[in-house]
Image (spheres, rainbow, N blue to C red):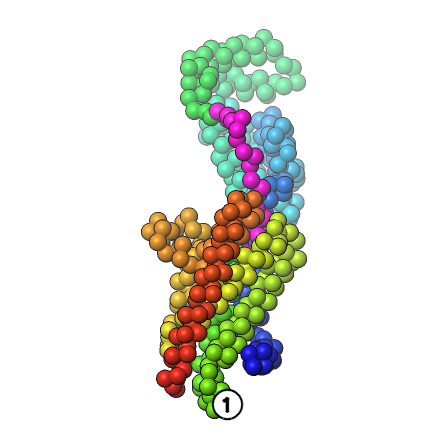
Amino acid sequence: MILDLLLKDLKRTRHNPWPVLIFLAVPLCITGLLGAVFGSLDSSEGLGRIRLAVVDEDESALGGFLRSAFSQGEAGEHFEPLIVERDEGERLLRENEVSAMLVIPSGFTTDFLAGAEPSPFELVKNPAQAFHPAIVEELMGVAVEGLSAVAALLGDQLPGWRSLFEDAERLDYIRLSSLILQGGERLERVEDFLFPPLVGYESTTSESAKPAPPTVNLFAYLLPGMAAMFLLFIGDGLTRDLYKEVRMRTLDRYRTMRISLLPLLLAKMLHAFAVMLVGALILFGGASLIFGFAWREPLRLAALVAAYVLCAAGCMTLLAALARSEKRADAMNTMIVFAMAFTGGSMFPLNVLPAFIQRTLSPVMPNYWLIRGAHQLEQGGPDGLVIAVTAGLAVAGVGLVVAAAWRFDRLLRKGVRE
């Protein structure tokens, strides 16, 4: 009997799969968009090389120094400067081939060494990219601060350096050594502040320190929260199907043939569990194929997700039973799901939520435990925690299913007509 009722509901879902498919497509789309914007958290990929168009209109020694700063030493590992004309730089920006365009204005070196206010650098950031242009902007801010410090330190020596640069074809080594000596004398005055610097850091490694946990792919980090929320929405729509049976009078026909409502209730909850489980398989398995990453512990993740689906199905069935009517369920359950998603960490990372919510509300939300367990699996966390989370979700799911069946049995026996 239960199998017949379950097959009937599955056929009905197959004939109208669009509500379920929409709730499956949305989290994949959101995860893909976030991943495209923020990139991967995998340390093997990092930020990648930052392509920068440099337009040197000054064509001086100082301009050459600024150009080469992006390609020398460690900076050369992360930056790929392209020396181009302004028109070419603008074209590269429009075609999203560079992250920013740096323009060194004409006469910059002359004005700087003369002690006058030089023309400002021009930095045009690519609006189609998020992080790379910001990194270039911050580094240029550091360069400007450094040049300002040099101007403040050397002061009246700058004209001497200017004349030295202007007569570059016939370098006066005596004057050069004199300028270096004067600069060294001024550095001695601030030696206590610069050598060693007042601010620094020290890196230490303990012999007993554990190796760093593996990094998490951004898609694997985002997807559990998104999937947990939309699986709740799928469960909400499926578990309210009992009220449709009341509205369409099929429940009355069933009760003329059967006394016990338990087979019908179990079939409805098994239907919700089966469809949510297939949805979870599509979300977690499909995301791995679409976004090109592999789950570190697929079997243990599958057990965790199955336990969550059981708990979520029981939770949403109980909520539908407590609503006592289809209209109340339509009005209240969506708000409750959003509240569960918010407090459980599906919409925002838990560490940005108020401490009160983190301590009291989050630990009672099933999506909180799915997210935490999935992250632990990806980070190589303690096995005991994941096992405890999986077992806890499964036990809670069984309890919620029993409570929901008891509540719906009492409600339907009283004769719901809404």
How many labels sit on residues? 1
Instruction: Determine the secondary structure under disc 1.
Output: helix
Residue 51 sits above or below residue 232 on the image: above
**Magenta stretch?**
202-223
x then y, percent, for residue 50: 61, 41
Left or right of 367 in this view: 288: right
- Which residue occupies the extreme front position in the image? 259
* Disc 1 residue type (three-letter): Met
x then y, percent, for residue 196: 46, 18
Front-most of residues 257 and 382: 257
Residue 202 sits above or below residue 382 on the image: above
Front-most of residues 369 and 6: 6
Q: Residue at x 66, y 53 (%)?
A: 292
Q: Residue at x 33, y 51 (%)?
A: 356
x then y, percent, for residue 377: 56, 49
Is residue 390 shown to the viewer in this render? yes
Is residue 354 shown to the viewer in this render? no
Q: Which quarter shows the C terminus? A: bottom left
Q: Residue at x 47, y 91 (%)?
A: 256
Give the labeled residue for mark 1: 257
Find out whether residue 214 is within the magenta segment.
yes
Find out whether residue 208 is within the magenta segment.
yes
Q: Which quarter shows the N terminus? A: bottom right
Residue 164 sits above or below residue 275 on the image: above
Left or right of 234 in this view: 169: right
x then y, percent, for residue 320: 42, 74
Front-most of residues 270 and 176: 270
- Magenta residues: mostly which secondary structure? loop
